[in-house]
Image (cartoon, helix red, strand yellow):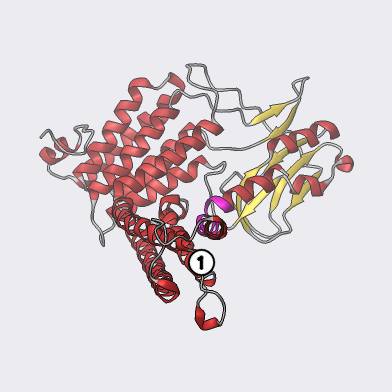
Amino acid sequence: MKLILTRLAERIGTSYWLVPTLCVAVAIGLSHAAQALDSHLSQDETAWYLFRGGPEGARSVLSAVSSSMMTFAGLVFSVTILVLQQASNQFSPRVLRTFLRDRRSQLPLGIFVGTFVYALLTLRGVRGTAEGIEMYVPSLAVWLAVVLVLLCVGTFIYYIHHVAQSIRAVVILTRIRDETRHTLERMYPEGLGEDTEDARLDRPRGNPSLLVPYSGTSGVLVAVDEEQLFSCAREAGVTLALVPMVGDFVPHGGMLLEVWGDASCLDVKVLVNAFSIGPERTLQQDTAFGFRQLVDIAEKALSPGINDPTTAVQAIDQLHDLLRRMVRRRFPSPVRGDEDGTPRLFCPRPDWNAYVRLAVDEVREYGEGSIQIARRLRFLLVDLLRVAPDFRRDELERQLALLDASVGRAFVDEREAELARRASPQGHGPH
């Protein structure tokens, strides 16, 4: 149930229809409320709220409102599609999730569609002598439609401003950084400290007594309910080991779990239900996916077709911030034991070295020959070495040596190589 609710929340979070649907529901309720209030108001000719255009005038106003709102909605939809295409081509297809989660882009579309629905429903309440019945104009409801039009004009101006801002590289990178930071703090909650890493116990020796395959549609391991797996293993007196890590691709028939011990008491269906498989990686439990998005943007910026090392430096800035938050943070042990200390669950997950390699290796390779990239990566590594505890220095020193070798290959002239070896927070020399 926990994973079902989590999957539902993730699906709703990346859905583009939620806010427009809520706006339509509000518009329906507002239309009924306004017409009900109109029926209790005095229709005296001197009333300030009275619409003086008659039934035909009210119909013209409401028809103009409804038709213009559909034009606005179509324009917003077209601009959104163009922005998504531009972001996919310029940055990375994986950043589209960030745009789909942006409620401020969905709200204008919802307001326009909601105003359209409101105008249609209000139009239904206008009656005139042409129908052979008593003339009636819901005056307050008609004036409210005019107010909504003014709101839509302001919303459209805001939407253009927001779209222009949201496609900026620094805004996209900051959003990804913030989402990754939230996942990082949720997955690594033990705070900061200089304690050494937990001892990593070896898996049981010998062949496992049971292999649990995945029989569903292939996809990416999005989340794992570790509590459910640990509870099953402890009750059955067995040891479980996850085969894939969160974020790994799981093919049909691929192995999910290895079991050591008497597996006759295990309910395989319950074990499989502890895994959430989706079509793509998410930041639900996959902190490395945030790093992957930032690295992809840096690589795309360094490609010959784009050749924008400054955007790559901005991506390295966000990678630097995330690594700085992790460098002294205690990583959870991949092994969970019961009260007696017996290992019951092995959950492989990326360690510190894996995150450093993910953040630096590919950017260094694609940015070889760029003075900006070399200087910015050196500043990242030197800064982390200043604060890293002893057990986290080896990978940073190895990366620094690889960066020196890369600079030596790319810059034959020793004077250029010397410039590239100077650490700079912005990737270039002093202003």
Q: Which residue is mark 1?
A: 122
Is residue 142 left or right of 229 when viewed as pictured?
A: left
**Magenta span includes 136:** no
Q: Position of residue 266 (x, y in %)?
A: 85, 42
**Magenta span includes 19:** yes
Query: Looking at the picture, does residue 72 appear above or below residue 156?
Result: below
Report the magenta stretch's main SS: helix
Q: Position of residue 252 (x, y in %)?
A: 68, 60
Question: Residue at the spot x=66%, y=42% of the render?
Answer: 224
Type of amino acid at the residue the image marks with label 1: Thr
Q: Start and end of the magenta stretch? A: 12-23
Image quadrant containing the N terminus: top right
Residue 372 appears in the picture as rendered: yes
Is residue 114 left or right of 74 when viewed as pictured?
A: right
Which of the two residues, 88 or 157, is positioned nearer the viewer here?
A: 157
Is residue 41 left or right of 76 when viewed as pictured?
A: right
> Which of the 4 image quarters holds residue 326?
top left
Question: Residue at the spot x=50%, y=59% of the render?
Answer: 20
Which of the two residues, 270 or 171, is positioned nearer the viewer here?
A: 171
Which of the two residues, 313 or 4, is positioned nearer the viewer here?
A: 4
Q: Residue furthest right?
A: 264
Image quadrant containing the C terminus: top left
Badge 1 crowding class, 10 Å Cα cut-off, few under 14, some 14 to 19, many 20 or more, is many
Q: Position of residue 163 (x, y in %)?
A: 33, 55
Q: Position of residue 253 (x, y in %)?
A: 71, 58
Is residue 378 left or right of 398 when viewed as pictured?
A: left
Q: Residue furthest top?
A: 194
Which of the two residues, 277 or 375, is positioned nearer the viewer here?
A: 277
